[in-house]
Amino acid sequence: MAMEELAAIKKLDFNMCMQCGKCTGSCPVSPKSKLNPRRFMLETAYLISPLTMHPPLNIQEKGELWDCTTCSTCSYRCPREVKPMDVLIGLRSLLVEAGNVPSTLGDALEGVYKYGNPWGLSRSKRQEWTQDLKVKYASEEEKIDLLYFVGCAASYDSRAQVVARAIVKNLNALSIDFSILGNKETCCGNEIISLGEKGLFEEIAGNNLALFDRYGVQKIVTTSPHCFHAFKSRYGRELAVKHYTQYFADLIDEEKIRFSGKIGKVVTYQDPCFLGKHNDIYDEPRKIIESIPGLRFEELGRSGKRSVCCEGGGGRMWYDIPGERLAEDRVREALDVGAEIIVVACPFCLLTFDDAIKTSGNEERIQVKDIMELVAETL
Ligand code: SF4
Ligand code: SF4
């Protein structure tokens, strides 16, 4: 078994686990999967220190490890401050090391390795969405004070591109000077490390940090909470990074945003796991939404710290499991509070909800939009 990966797992606090089961009880995926974080805590202890009556866990048979969305609810709810999610990611790395990865996830990893994005699309097409927009690209001639880091989904997916276009439109409307990396941009690696592919993640992080240095990047704003989280917490260097919700909430505080239009709809908001549970960012998105004139904001039944994952994180954008998607359940919750628009702040939420609205047959009743789309419509 891979010694380096095992050594990394040993450093985690799995021995503090008292088997209370709060992690499994709060895991949104476990009701439809064999995924059981409590059991993994126990089995990890046997893996590290096998006992005669408990033969070591055969980790290579634990395919349910891929079902985890890395939503972090288990880590968040654990009374012993054990981090079951980190242990699961550590166990995933043992599967990666053995090449035991579902084919669609293998394709996503290969896409990032070869082309810098999990869809395996050409690097030369990354900035195509900017063709008719006023955008400054990184160049050796000028240091970048504000870098808008677009991310893979918003660069390549036609629905998520609408969000990138809205961010560019909003920054330009507010006369904010910014640059993008264009075709030089590459994956942030957040989903790569979540899948347990540490080697590839380290390579990506090193390359991205070198790019930031090369262009003298001072501040970074991201489309995606996943990129934000990677830069903030996983790159091992302090970076001045904000998710766009933080950046635009600050602009509202500074009275730099004046809305001229209105949205006459009832809206609700899905907290993205990588903003909320991972980073405690709950107020800023709501501040922007509630500043938009004309709309009525209704909280979902389970929101903020009690919010439920859309099921798009941790590699699950490229790996489906049987059963109703969590986003479909959330669409029903949104309809229950009378919402006409589910507002999101994450490209993965946008895509999973877009899909869930269609698969649940609710296209006539409800839409999903990113906060930046609403801002672009009303600025
Ligand atoms: S919530 Fe924490 S202490 Fe309880 S079973 Fe899960 S990991 Fe162990
Ligand atoms: S991170 Fe989320 S999906 Fe994964 S085990 Fe924990 S609660 Fe379940």
Image: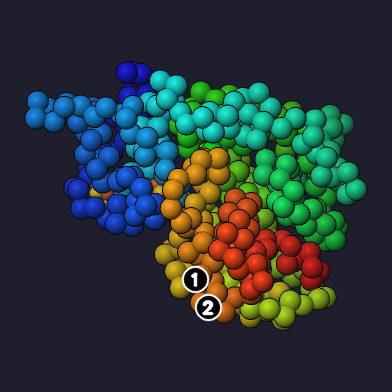
Which amino acid type is shown beneath numbered disc 2? Val
Q: Is residue 226 left or right of residue 164?
A: left
Q: Residue 169 location in percent, x, y? A: 82, 57
Closer-to-camera residue (85/33): 33
Q: Residue 328 location in percent, x, y? A: 51, 61
Which amino acid type is shown beneath numbered disc 1? Glu
Q: Is residue 263 left or right of residue 11?
A: right
Q: Name which residue lies at 61% across and 56% down.
A: 355
Q: Residue 140 location in percent, x, y? A: 84, 29
Query: Pointer 1: what residue?
Result: 333
Query: Pointer 2: what residue?
Result: 337
Q: Name which residue lies at 67% across and 50% down.
A: 223
Tell me how far mark 2 sits from mark 1, CA to CA.
Answer: 7 Å
Label 1 residue SS: helix
Look at the numbered disc 2 and say if its residue's Cβ is closer than 8 Å to ligand 2. no
Q: Is residue 293 positioned above or below 109 on the image?
A: below
Asked if residue 308 shows in the view, the reply is yes
Label 2 residue SS: loop
User: What scheme was used to colour the molecule?
Assistant: rainbow
Residue lying furthest left: 53
Q: Residue 200 location in percent, x, y? A: 55, 25
- The label on residue 151 is none
Look at the numbered disc 1 and say if its residue's Cβ is closer than 8 Å to ligand 2. no
Please tell me how crowded label 2 is: few (under 14), some (14-19), or many (20+) other residues with Cα within 10 Å: some
Closer-to-camera residue (218/304): 304
Asked if marks 2 and 1 touch (Cβ < 8 Å), the reply is: yes
Asked if residue 286 shows in the view, the reply is no
